[in-house]
Image (spheres, rainbow, N blue to C red):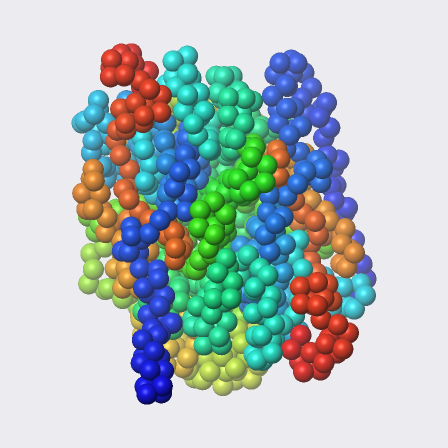
Amino acid sequence: MATPKVAPWPAIPISKPEEVYAGLSEQAKEYPLFLESIVRQEHNFEKPEALSRLRVLDCSTRMMIGHWCSSLLAELGAEVIQVEPLGGDPLRQNTPFGRRQYMFRDKETGEEVGGQFLHEMRNKLSITLNLETEEGREILKKLAVQSDVVIENAPPGQWDSWGIGYRQLSETNPRLIYCWVGQRGQWGPLKDKPGMLDPVAQAACGFVHGTGDPKEFGGQPTRSALWMADHVGGTSAAMGILAAVLHRENVSGQGQFIEATAAEAIIRILDYNWAWHSMDGSIRPRYGNWDLAINIYAVNPCKDGYMMVGGGHDRLWYRIWRTVGDEYPTVEEDILGDPHLREVADRLAHDMQVKTYTMLGEWLKDNPRSEAERKLSKQQVASGGVLYVNEVAEYPHFKYRGHVGEYDSPHYGKILYGTTPFLQQKTPGRLKWLGRPTGYDNGDVYRRLLGLNREDFTRLKQAKVI
Amino acid sequence: MAQETAGAAQAKQPTFEEFCHQTFDFKKAFGKPEALKGCRVLSCTQYILGPSCASYLAELGAEVIKIEAPRRGEAMRHTTPFNEPFLYPLSRWVPERGTGLGFLGANPNEYFISCDFHRPEGQAIVKKLAAKSDVVVENYRPGTFERWGIGYRQLSKINPRLVYCWLGGFGGWGPGRVRASYDILGQSQGGNFGMTGKPEFMGGAPSKHTIWLADYWGGMMGAVQILAALYWRDKVSGEGTFTEYSQVHGVTRQLEYALPLYGRHGIVRERWGNWDTQLCVHGIIKCGKSSYPQSENPQEQEEGYILVSAYDDKDFVRLCQTVGDGKTAEKYAKHDARVKPQSQIEIYDLLEKWAADKTKEQVAELLDKANINNQPVWNSKEVANHPHWQERGAVQWLDDQTFGDLMHQGPAYMMSATPPRLKWALKPVGADNEYILGKLAGLSSEELRRLEEQECI
């Protein structure tokens, strides 16, 4: 396949500190420069890792929730061993619209991996293990004895019936923190309803119903483009795991059983849905890119895309209309003269939101995102355009801070990726490597943790155990 | 005899489901210890990102002290859908107003004190509290706390074990450091907003994730970082640290294959509506009929939607059999053929035609019979009243000590030994002034009264 012609990243060079802070007084630049000096990612490798003493076995497959959870732990320094079925996690095969040319190819073996799996295979070791075999499960038991955390997502009760569930593993390793992750839960009335992949959870928790435009505006329930519930659920699983680690180290000396689901993580953060329903039977409606509880706080079309403008309270409200009034004095007059828009609370009525955004739209339609942002920023109003991924990758502020990075992989070549947001002074998160071919670390992990030798490897491979 | 004993022991062994149910029963949480008992957190936060971060620690048993502006409290208390529902009173000083529901979910289990950060006496109180705390969570504009003399550099001198967590939009350094941010801006600029919703050729536009997702989820990311820092402090160094979480950075972190694809091929990931770019069939379809045609609520009059998931070849064949279309089963027997954009358009169109005379429940029943994965799109009423979520405590009735009966979300995850739990939803502004300031700052009732009169607390 011909190498596609793609501009190198970054297309525009990253700014230098002296450009960014040009014109500021010594006093004004002292604080941001101090922050830079303590959290800049360039210094990461001079510092220790927060979780370097923890070993995590991530045995989850086919679902992102477990991988996301272990990614966060791996970024913070845990030794994460990704345990994959023979041939690799089926997620490795995922690629948009089935286009194999978008996959990343191992330079040596030609093995392909999709970008989604690769992106979460950060800092992890890859081993293969066939848990369908008795011997594979014996090996897992031995690995679990030497681990702090096990993550799995098998159908409810499967590991228990295999003799490697929490009840059994906690006997041989009472310090083990065992975390089951899934979409809807391993117990309760829906436990046997199959469905492993997001957006199952998004649909089951009320998130999809609440996202998108209302029907009257031509909208329908909308899923997140991302496997968002898995990301949120995986993050909550990581919280639970770390809380269990702290309790084990500081208090009990014992591990415990954790269950985290993608649906319940979103239910937790669906703010007032449940209380509101309990008060008067309300069902939260979709409200598109506007907000039920704040006006102005929305994304609306502008000249070259979509523009976020936010400012709920009076101080920002008047600044927004002053900005608009510079070009459309009549709009400002109309808004400020409307008695129904005078009180913050009154502005929340639906009709008033329609009026607000119709008037704001008058101004936005002539302003591209960058212009609108420049004008509103002068008034310190929170605003910004909806950015697409090419714009995110080149956005000067993000580039300067390193939100996007390029990793030169010994296996796959250069990969553009989203860096860890865990910035820290003493034990920052970091990327050590991105992506491993299937079973790449079998030799290392099985020798180091189980003392297997060459003959063992040959036999286990022939028996299709590893 | 021996056999009988073994049999009895076996009978006693609960099934896995019984075991889970007993282990994770949220009603038994209060008989168990708390993971973060003894950990004290100062939450100098407003809106959602910072407050939710601290509240996750409060669910785990940390003593979280939320500090708000005197009298009216923080901005989120004045935010509620359509300006209708409120919880009264806002505070003892402003009894005629209430707290808006926007505040709910971001502040459970916390102690509420009021304190004016602008005033030297207020700053002195923060210093006293920080000296006795493990964590400070703060989301003011970068450098503001430093200017007030209560930033990381000042507080870490008083208490070197302090973990200081700043959360915000764009971070405290770099060309955009002065920009204000909200959740919706984090979503817009981080990149997940532009990818969500239908593509332009289907009449779609970028869509917001309805909840304040970059805030609530960003708070979780902050909590993960804090827990890791506490572990390092307790287990290794004995020292606190400074952490910075930018919500827009967090959103960019989760763009899946978008950045690798763009970097390698220059291709910009586009929206793909309710379908999946990588799997087919794995998408949400419209069912033609409403499940509640008699309801007066427009949320219920609307047609139903359901997620259909049959991306495995065998599942797809069964799906086509259920729909009664053998030709499509043959034409798209292989996943690579099904998942192409044009094929997806054709297949989902077929499914929607089949579902046009059915409710989402009827579609679910037919799919269940054929053993095809599905999930009806539930609205918040259906979720709130579903026995699965109620039994698991995902939504639970709370007998709140201030506000009475409220339905409230439970913690996001379960733990067997030290379960996170819900104690109270929130309290009025300054409700714990006497308790906390007496206990930790040693203020006498006379001093408290004076500070109160001066509106310093």
Query: Which residue is found at the position 77% from the left and 59% from the top?
Result: A411
Q: In this view, does B233 lie to the left or right of A461?
A: left
Q: Is residue A208 left or right of residue A377?
A: left
Residue A84 visible in the current orientation = yes
- How many numbered circles does the render carry? 0
Q: Position of residue B404 (x, y in %)?
A: 18, 43
Picture layout, residue A1 above or below residue A8:
below
Picture layout, residue A169 above or below residue A252:
below
Q: Is residue B337 left or right of residue A158?
A: right
Query: Which residue is found at the position 40% from the left and 82% from the top?
Result: B370
Query: Which residue is found at the position 73% from the left and 75% from the top?
Result: A457
Picture layout, residue A65 above or below residue B370:
above
| Relative depth, front residue between B336 and A434 | A434
Residue B245 sits in quarter: top right
Q: Where is residue B357 in the image (x, y as percent from the top left)?
A: 32, 73
Picture layout, residue B115 above or below residue B320:
above
Q: Where is residue A72 in the image (x, y as percent from the top left)?
A: 57, 50
In the image as oriented, which residue stretches furthest toward the front?
B1
Q: Position of residue B247 (x, y in %)?
A: 52, 39
Q: In this view, does B120 lie to the left or right of B359?
A: right
Image quarter where the C terminus of chain A lies is: bottom right
Residue B382 visible in the current orientation = no
Image quarter where the N terminus of chain A lies is: bottom right
Query: Which residue is found at the position 61% from the left and 33% from the top?
Result: A425
| Relative depth, front residue between B24 and A43 | B24
